[in-house]
Image (cartoon, grey):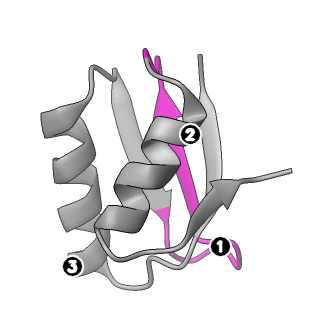
Amino acid sequence: MIGIFKTNIGTYHERNLVIRAICNNFDVTSCNVDIEDCDKVLRIVDMKVDEHHIISFVKQQGFQCEVLE
């Protein structure tokens, strides 16, 4: 499953921290944040967990996160 989320991750440093945290805690193929996009899109490929787990985890890291409609 591919997860697409809207976030408020705004810097390269924040992006790297979140990607590292996700990859270390979840079984995913790849993870990226487009900080140039207005929605700061977090894209996770081959998510093996429910979207709500990712949203909760990213929020625990101090960022907003919701499914991008």
Amino acid on which the number 2 mark rests in the picture: His
Q: CA distance from mark 1 to mark 3?
A: 16 Å
Q: Earlier in the sequence, mark 2 or mark 1?
A: 1
Label 1 SS? loop
Q: In the shown orientation, is residue 42 left or right of residue 32?
A: right
Q: Is residue 6 above or below residue 2?
A: below
Q: In the shown orientation, is residue 68 left or right of residue 69?
A: left
Label 2 SS? helix
How many badges with numbers are in the image? 3
Question: In x, y percent, where is residue 56?
Answer: 45, 52
Question: In x, y percent, where is residue 49?
Answer: 45, 21
Give yes or no for contact between labels 1 and 3 (Cβ–Cβ under 8 Å): no
At 13% from the left and 37% from the top, the residue drawn is: 24
The segment highlighted magenta reads: 34-48
Residue located beneath label 1 in the image? 37
Mark sitting on residue 13:
3
Amino acid on which the number 1 mark rests in the picture: Asp
Question: In x, y percent, where is residue 69?
Answer: 86, 50
Q: In the shown orientation, is residue 19 left or right of residue 35?
A: left
Q: Is residue 21 above or below residue 28?
A: below
Residue located beneath label 2 in the image? 52
Question: In x, y percent, where is residue 40?
Answer: 58, 71
Q: Is residue 31 above or below residue 49?
A: below
Give yes or no for contact between labels 3 and 2 (Cβ–Cβ under 8 Å): no
